[in-house]
Image (spheres, rainbow, N blue to C red):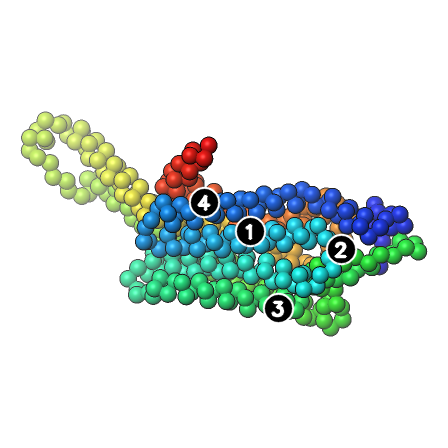
């Protein structure tokens, strides 16, 4: 193999030196991932504690939110920890079974959390767009979540076969050295006809990711249109009332003391206050729907780079090797490859922004600890 590490002199470098070189490159990535672990554990633990202990309600939301928080905690912790281990043993990963388990665990935990989002989207759609249709989703909610993670197990199981340690030989003059890298598609599956296996599995993964994104987008688009239509009808009624198209009774004594122009102004103010109250009540009833829409949007956006890089690394066996001469670009792309973890740590911030009760309880906890 041609030299791809021009800034490393193989003649004067040991195997350990090359690994240390990559650890040094990935120090910022490791720091980010450590922060992800901290936020994922602390943030999601606070979500679980507050919604289960402080906000004791029997609504659907108070099942979904802690359930999603558990899934996010698993995904952020497993994915970040596995990625850090791979960085520390970037060119010196010799444990084949450990490599397979890590890739399986990362995909299992991430896809499990994503499937919970699909379950939430289906439930929101049925509740808002089909309110009068009977549904047994919530009656079987625990069984459904278990089935989702079983499905995630089947989806991730091919990685136990495709992932593994690739052995890459670098040559520089008379000096050569073999690197051992833990990869999603190991080197021998990228050669000859075996490349079809790698492409087929990548195609399956891409199809699943795109299907999840399509389902989330389609369902929430319909939900959003339904909510927007309702708000529009409320606004239309307000205009009709303010223009005097609806009758409003006034006592004779009140009318006699008010001038005609003042009466119209009073009616408009009362109509506006009534509309604002109804709109606030409507938004309060559906604010969890808005939160779940935002969470799903973050999921789609943060997983898009991973999907693209996954396809590129499958069709080009030297994709990552081609960036070894550009440390900054390699570091950035590797971080982008784990950007999907942001989806698993963003939810506590979204709840704090959009859920007043959660924010109030969170501030109480923080004030007590300070």
Q: Earlier in the sequence, mark 2 or mark 1?
A: 1
Give left or right: position of 172 versus 179: right
Viewer-nearest of discs 4 and 3: 4
Determine the CA span between mark 2 and mark 3.
Answer: 24 Å
Neighbour tally class for label 1: few under 14, some 14-19, many 20 plus, Cα within 10 Å:
many
Q: Earlier in the sequence, mark 2 or mark 4?
A: 4
In the rendered image, the quadrant that contains the N terminus is bottom right
Looking at this view, is 49 or 237 the one in front? 49
Give left or right: position of 261 versus 198: left
Viewer-nearest of discs 1 and 3: 1
Residue at point 67% right, 67% down?
Answer: 162
Q: Position of residue 32 (x, y in %)?
A: 62, 43
The residue under label 3 is 158
Residue at point 55% right, 44% down?
Answer: 38
Determine the CA span between mark 1 and mark 4.
Answer: 15 Å
Neighbour tally class for label 4: few under 14, some 14-19, many 20 plus, Cα within 10 Å:
some
Labelled disc at residue 2: none
Viewer-nearest of discs 2 and 3: 2
The residue under label 2 is 92
The residue under label 4 is 46
Determine the CA span between mark 2 and mark 4.
Answer: 37 Å
Residue 352: quadrant of the picture: top left
């Amino acid at each position: 193999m041609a030299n791809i590490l021009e800034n490393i002199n193989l003649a004067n470098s040991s195997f350990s030196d090359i690994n240390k070189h990559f650890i040094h490159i990935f120090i910022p990535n490791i720091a980010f991932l450590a922060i992800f672990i901290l936020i994922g554990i602390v943030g999601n633990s606070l979500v679980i504690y507050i919604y289960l202990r402080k906000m004791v309600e029997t609504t659907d939301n108070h099942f979904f939110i802690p359930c999603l928080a558990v899934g996010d905690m698993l995904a952020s912790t497993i994915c970040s920890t596995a990625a850090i281990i791979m960085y520390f043993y970037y060119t010196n990963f010799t444990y084949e079974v450990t490599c397979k388990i890590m890739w399986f665990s990362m995909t299992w935990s991430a896809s499990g959390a994503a499937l919970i989002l699909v379950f939430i989207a289906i439930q929101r759609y049925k509740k808002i767009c089909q309110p009068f249709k009977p549904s047994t989703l919530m009656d079987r909610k625990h069984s459904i979540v278990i089935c989702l993670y079983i499905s995630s197990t089947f989806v991730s199981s091919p990685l136990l076969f495709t992932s593994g340690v690739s052995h890459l030989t670098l040559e520089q003059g008379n000096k050569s050295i073999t690197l051992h890298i833990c990869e999603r598609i190991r080197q021998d599956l990228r050669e000859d006809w075996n490349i079809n296996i790698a492409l087929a599995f990548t195609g399956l993964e891409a199809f699943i990711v795109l299907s999840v994104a399509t389902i989330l987008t389609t369902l929430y688009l319909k939900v959003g249109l339904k909510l927007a239509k309702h708000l529009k009808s409320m606004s239309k009624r307000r205009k009709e009332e303010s223009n005097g198209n609806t009758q409003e009774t006034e006592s004779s004594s009140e009318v006699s003391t008010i001038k005609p122009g003042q009466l119209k102004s009073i009616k408009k103010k009362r109509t506006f206050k009534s509309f604002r109250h109804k709109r606030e009540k409507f938004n309060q009833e559906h604010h969890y729907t808005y939160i779940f829409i935002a969470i799903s949007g973050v999921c789609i956006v943060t997983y898009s780079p991973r999907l693209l890089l996954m396809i590129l690394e499958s069709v080009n066996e030297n994709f990552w090797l081609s960036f070894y001469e550009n440390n900054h670009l390699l570091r950035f792309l590797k971080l982008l490859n784990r950007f999907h973890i942001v989806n698993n740590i963003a939810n506590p911030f979204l709840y704090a922004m959009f859920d007043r009760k959660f924010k109030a309880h969170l501030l109480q906890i923080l004030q007590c600890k300070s």
